[in-house]
Image (cartoon, rainbow, N blue to C red):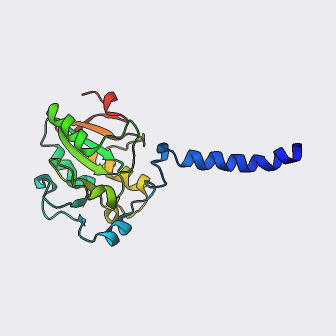
């Protein structure tokens, strides 16, 4: 009897690991570890573009376009507004801390805050929706940061944007006042607005 239990234990553990890895806490898949830039460009070569001129002048267009930018390009934009939020959006996340771009735009409009949505990684199926938001969704320029690893390029992007090293990796919301970082949080409710 004990031999049977001993043989079933590895099977039970492997099932628990598989169930745990497939939950929303890891965004439903391993998506989010890498940029998936090359895969997205293969699927839709016209979806991702580098901005021509100032990022600040870009507004949402009729066609779905994701602009690949770095933190230094975004910094002058957030300096123009009394209050702005940079939201690191996870396209496949469906947990309570993940807010759709449309809902984020409504919240920011209501609170008179300028919104900049930065996709944590590229995801064709979620990025072609072209939600009715004021500005386009931005992606992080992996070539500029010389890495395809999400953790590395987000860290470098935030250093360029804030001028400081951000140690908490789980923050998705960054509140700025005239370009200076005021607060950062994992959830919108915890942000000191």
User: Picture quarter containing residue 16?
Assistant: top right
16 left or right of 2 in image: left
Viewer-closest of 92 and 182: 92
Residue 32: x percent and y percent?
A: 43, 53
Viewer-closest of 35 and 42: 42
Q: Is residue 119 visible?
A: yes
User: Picture quarter containing residue 114?
Assistant: top left
59 left or right of 145 in image: left
Viewer-closest of 15 and 185: 15
Seen at 14% across and 54% down, the residue is: 60
Q: How many marks?
A: 0
150 left or right of 103 in image: right
Residue 61: x percent and y percent?
A: 13, 57
Residue 168: x percent and y percent?
A: 42, 39
Seen at 67% across and 50% down, the residue is: 14
User: Picture quarter containing residue 1?
Assistant: top right
Q: Is residue 177 visible?
A: no
Q: Quadrant of the C terminus?
A: top left
Seen at 29% across and 69% down, the residue is: 44
């Amino acid at each position: 009897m004990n031999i049977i239990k001993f043989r079933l234990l590895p099977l039970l553990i492997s099932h628990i690991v598989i169930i745990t890895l497939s939950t929303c806490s890891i965004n439903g898949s391993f998506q989010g570890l890498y940029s998936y830039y090359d895969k997205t460009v293969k699927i839709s070569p016209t979806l991702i573009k580098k901005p021509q001129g100032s990022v600040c002048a870009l507004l949402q267009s009729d066609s779905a376009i994701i602009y690949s930018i770095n933190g230094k390009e975004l910094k002058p934009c957030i300096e123009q507004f009394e209050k702005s939020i940079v939201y690191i959006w996870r396209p496949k996340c469906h947990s309570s801390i993940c807010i759709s771009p449309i809902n984020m735009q409504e919240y920011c409009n209501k609170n008179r805050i300028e919104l900049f949505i930065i996709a944590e990684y590229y995801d064709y199926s979620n990025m072609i929706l072209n939600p009715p938001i004021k500005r386009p969704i931005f992606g992080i320029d992996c070539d500029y940061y010389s890495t395809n690893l999400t953790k590395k390029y987000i860290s470098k992007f935030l250093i360029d944007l804030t001028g400081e090293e951000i140690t908490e990796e789980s923050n998705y919301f960054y509140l700025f006042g005239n370009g200076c970082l005021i607060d950062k949080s994992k959830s919108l409710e915890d942000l000191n607005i």
